[in-house]
């Protein structure tokens, strides 16, 4: 990507193509803009309309779909960053949309505050993460978007709109996970709470035991997740629960050895070997699945929920009714075992409570997430197609930012409030200023 120096309201004719983090999506916009305020952004949207160009905003490119790709105007929110205000009476924080989650988490911790739940990485911008439905795992606490109390967005006609349960509530109901289809988000107000401690207990466990005890493990822990290593019967489980303390963080050397050296450095080498010599993958999986030992530690939330992820991959994730999870996992394991597929990445399983956001993958139902990954550069269609066949048979909803082939006809069947969202889109963006090929596929036109 070419480099350039940005100032307030800066714009330039695009040179090199834009690429996402995984490298599987490329687009060549007509121009790139980097507005320093909501007013400058509104002016750029009006200018794009005069020029007959579409508009998309891109964060850090962590989506595996082309949700942010455009051949028109690419908005970079690099200058829309930072905390606007902290309201300790209401226990909220209002943050500019381009702020990376990592910076938000660190800043909140300095103020003695925290989000209630978060995903397992924090490289995304707050608007990118919420607009695609990024989530962690939780028995009672839901996605990042479910923690939104208000948001500000610029609509297709350049209007700056504030949305909450009391102000423009019909927009608020949808725009928390808006896919970039309703407008460009410029600020988000999150609910926060006093910073707390979590005790993480990581433990290897056999696949059959995890499946048999899945409901119990979910019920007994505030945050439960596990990874299954294909070609083995081995899983690694993680249970996060609130703790009265004291803090007992990972030793610096021990944490580096497992989270950086093993989970990133050694795993990168193993994936590269597996891509070059696919028949070696099952043996590598057996070794990898035994490399991480049981450990327990207690720390503030973002140091427990999130981990560094430096090995690049492609990912597909489906949200299923939670009661269908164990059946789908057994079917997934049987499919891998009877197929010639060689899968180098573990399968990740998480949960979420039902929420009330129109296009949330957990909208209206208790949810389990099943995510599959393959190392970047590895042929993925055969594996992902077979997985998708299993997930859709259980009424699965694909993550908006991860690889899938579903279209509006399918999605209208699995989202009861789908028509509510598309009707709102018709009202807010009748000329499809924020459209692209991906949104035409998943929302219709």
Image (tube, rainbow, N blue to C red):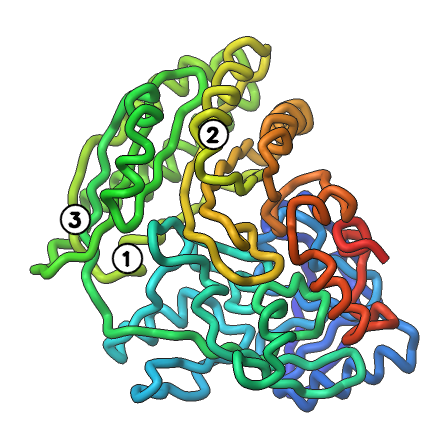
Query: In this view of the protein, can residue 324 be seen by the observer?
Result: yes
In the rendered image, is residue 379 in sight? no
Q: Could you tell me if the residues under marks 3 and 1 are in contact, i.e. CB atoms within 8 Å?
A: no
Please report whichever mark, 1 or 2, sits nearer to the chain's N-terminal start. Answer: 1
Q: Position of residue 17 (x, y in %)?
A: 76, 56
**Residue drawn at (56%, 56%) of the image:** 360
Image quadrant where one finds the C terminus: bottom right
Secondary structure beneath label 2: loop
Asked if 121 appears above or below 150 in the picture, the reply is: above
- Which residue does the image show at 56% across and 23% down from the upper left? 275
Q: Residues within 10 Å of mark 3 (few under 14, many from 20)?
A: some
Residue nearest the viewer, comparing 429 with 257: 429
Name the residue: 40% across, 72% down. 104
According to the image, label 1 marks what residue?
303
Q: Which residue is mark 2?
A: 345
**21, above or below 325, in the image:** below
Q: Quadrant of residue 397?
A: top right
Out of 217 and 290, give the one closest to the viewer: 217
Q: Specify the quadrant of the image occupied by residue 229.
A: top left
Tell whether 259 sits left or right of 254: right
Left or right, 267 with reference to 374:
left
From mark 1 to mark 2, how far is it between C-alphas?
23 Å
189 relative position to 338: left or right: left
Depth check, front residue: 327 or 404: 327
Mark 3 highlights which residue? Answer: 297
Q: Name the one closer to the observer, 160 or 277.
A: 160
Q: Quadrant of the N terminus?
A: bottom right
């Amino acid at each position: 990507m070419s480099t350039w120096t940005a100032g307030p309201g800066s714009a330039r004719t695009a040179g090199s193509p834009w690429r996402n983090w995984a490298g599987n999506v490329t687009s060549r916009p007509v121009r790139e803009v980097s507005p320093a305020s909501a007013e400058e952004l509104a002016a750029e949207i009006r200018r794009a309309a005069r020029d007959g160009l579409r508009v998309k905003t891109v964060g850090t490119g962590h989506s595996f779909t082309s949700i942010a790709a455009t051949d028109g105007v690419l908005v970079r929110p690099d200058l829309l960053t930072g905390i606007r205000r902290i309201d300790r009476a209401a226990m909220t924080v209002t943050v500019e949309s381009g702020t990376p989650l990592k910076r938000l988490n660190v800043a909140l911790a300095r103020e003695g505050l925290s989000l209630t739940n978060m995903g397992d990485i924090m490289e995304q911008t707050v608007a990118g993460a919420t607009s695609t439905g990024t989530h962690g795992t939780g028995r009672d606490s839901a996605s990042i978007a479910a923690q939104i109390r208000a948001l500000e967005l610029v609509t297709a006609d350049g209007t700056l709109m504030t949305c909450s349960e009391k102000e423009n509530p019909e927009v608020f109901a949808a725009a928390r996970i808006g896919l970039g289809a309703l407008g460009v988000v410029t600020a988000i107000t999150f609910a926060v709470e006093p910073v707390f401690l979590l005790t993480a207990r990581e433990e290897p466990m056999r696949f059959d035991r995890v499946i048999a005890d899945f409901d119990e493990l979910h019920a007994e822990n505030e945050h439960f997740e596990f990874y299954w290593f294909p070609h083995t019967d081995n899983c690694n489980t993680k249970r996060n629960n609130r703790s009265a303390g004291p803090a007992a963080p990972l030793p610096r050397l021990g944490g580096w050895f497992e989270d950086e050296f093993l989970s990133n450095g050694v795993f990168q080498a193993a994936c590269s070997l597996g891509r070059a010599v696919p028949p070696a993958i099952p043996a590598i999986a057996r070794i990898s699945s035994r490399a991480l030992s049981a450990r327990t530690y207690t720390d503030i939330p973002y140091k427990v929920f999130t981990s560094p992820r430096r090995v690049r991959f492609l990912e597909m994730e489906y949200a299923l009714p939670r009661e269908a999870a164990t059946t789908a996992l057994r079917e997934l394991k049987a499919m891998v075992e009877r197929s010639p597929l060689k899968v180098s990445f573990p399968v990740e399983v998480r949960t979420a409570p039902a929420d009330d956001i129109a296009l949330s993958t957990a909208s209206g139902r208790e949810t389990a997430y099943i995510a599959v990954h393959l190392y970047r550069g590895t042929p993925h269609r055969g594996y992902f197609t077979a997985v998708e066949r299993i997930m859709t048979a259980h009424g699965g909803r694909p993550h908006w930012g991860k690889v899938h082939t579903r279209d509006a006809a399918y999605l209208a069947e699995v989202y009861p409030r789908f028509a509510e969202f598309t009707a709102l889109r018709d009202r807010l963006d009748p000329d499809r200023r924020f459209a692209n090929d991906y949104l035409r596929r998943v929302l219709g036109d």
